Each structure stands twice: as C-alpha cells, then as structure tokens.
Amino acid sequence: DLNVRGLEYLNGPDILIINNVLYSYNAGSQRYEIPAGVTKIAPSAFKRNQSLETLIMPSTVTEIGDFAFVDCCNLQEIVSSNNITYIGVYAFAGTEKLTSIDFSTKMERINEGAFQYSGLQSISIPSNVKCIDAFAFQYCHELEEVILSEGLETIAKYAFYDDYSLDNKFINDDDKVRDELIFELYSGDAFYVDYISFYYRGTDNEIENTTD
C-alpha cells in the first residue's frame, strides 16, 4: 500500500484506489471485497472484467459510477451497501449472470440503462425511488416479477421493453397485479404511476367509472 499525493491503496498493479475512490479493477480474481472506507466506484472501474463473479461492498460505498460494471459477463452476486444513493447510467448493463440485487433504500432514481441486458429475475423497488429512467431494465429476458412501491411516480419510455418473461407480473404494495401495465411499457410511452395506481385500486365498476 502506498500513500503518495492522496494515493491510499494500490493493491497490486490491477487495483487502484485514490482518496477513497475505486478507479480501476483489472484483477483476475473471482471474488473481490472492496476495502472499508471506499465511498465511490468510479465510472467504468470494472468495465468488461471477465473474471469477477462475486463482489462485496462495504457500507461506506454511496455511489456507483456510470458504466462501472458494464459487460461484466460473469458477475453473479453482489453484496451491496444500503447507503448507495446513486447508480450511474448503464452501470450494470450486460451483466447477464446477475440474477438479483438488493436496492438501497436511500436511492431516489434508477438511471437510464442501469440494468439493461442483465439477468435479474425479480426486483423490488424501494419506497424512496421516484423514477425509473428509460431503458433501465430493457432486455432483461429473465425478469419475471417487479414489485412497485407507493413512492414511485414515473416509469420512463422503454424502461422494461422486451422483458418477455415478465408476463404482466407487476405488483404494487397491496399485492395486486397491474394487469395492463405491461402494454403501456411495451408501447414506449412514458408511464405515470400516480394515475395508474389510482386507476387500478378500485373495483371493476369503479375503474369503468374513472374512464368515462
């Protein structure tokens, strides 16, 4: 380990951490535990790493940069920090073997393409998340269930586009399936959850009355 001009850790030639920011990881290990004290994973830090299968984050991590894990095709498991407030655009795009992730309750937005082409099978959106951006879960062909929260306000265009395993399995906090939500998402239209939550909360007769 070195401490020169803010260089706090240099764990071999393949891992670079400066001022509590993990800038690059090019090691060939299947498992990596990020050192405690690291607060940010820089953009493209793990980009296209072919070896990493398991990643463990300390609770100090609050930010994952854009494209941080893009095309990490063998990444299967993430033990994440519940203090994460930001996951960058396309951060986990192309992580085809990543089947699950626990979202931090401190996040307010799931950014564009964050999990595009990932292997996620089921996701639960935390109550603090207000917006799911465009392409966030596009082409997640293994995704079978999405649990929405009352705090969610907007699902942007193509957020769940071509998730053909989903088969209408959108569930709100009351465990009621939102039967026609999938059509809205496939159509590419922006979708405002406040309106639909109200629309689907009543009886069939009440729903008919809201459309008059």
Image: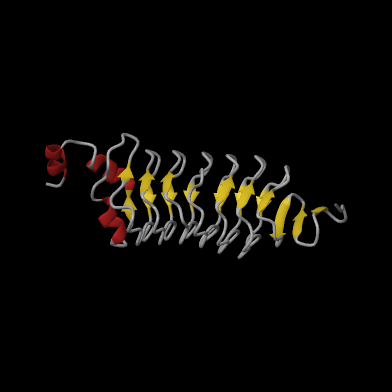
Residue pictured at 37% horizontal, 52% vertical = 155
User: x, y (%) of residue 130?
Assistant: 43, 45
User: x, y (%) of residue 152?
Assistant: 39, 44
In this view, the residue in front, 74 or 190, is: 74
Residue pictured at 37% horizontal, 50% vertical = 154
Side of 1 where 172 appears, left or right: left
Q: Which of the 4 image quadrants contains residue 134? A: bottom left
User: x, y (%) of residue 200?
Assistant: 23, 41
In this view, the residue in front, 142 or 43, is: 142
User: x, y (%) of residue 205?
Assistant: 11, 38
Side of 204 where 54 appears, left or right: right
Q: Residue furthest top?
A: 174
73 lies above or below 33: below
Residue pictured at 46% horizontal, 61% vertical = 117
**Number of disc labels:** 0
Side of 82 where 159 appears, left or right: left
In this view, the residue in front, 36 or 53, is: 53
Q: What kind of colouring is applied to the model shown?
A: secondary structure
In this view, the residue in front, 56 or 62, is: 56
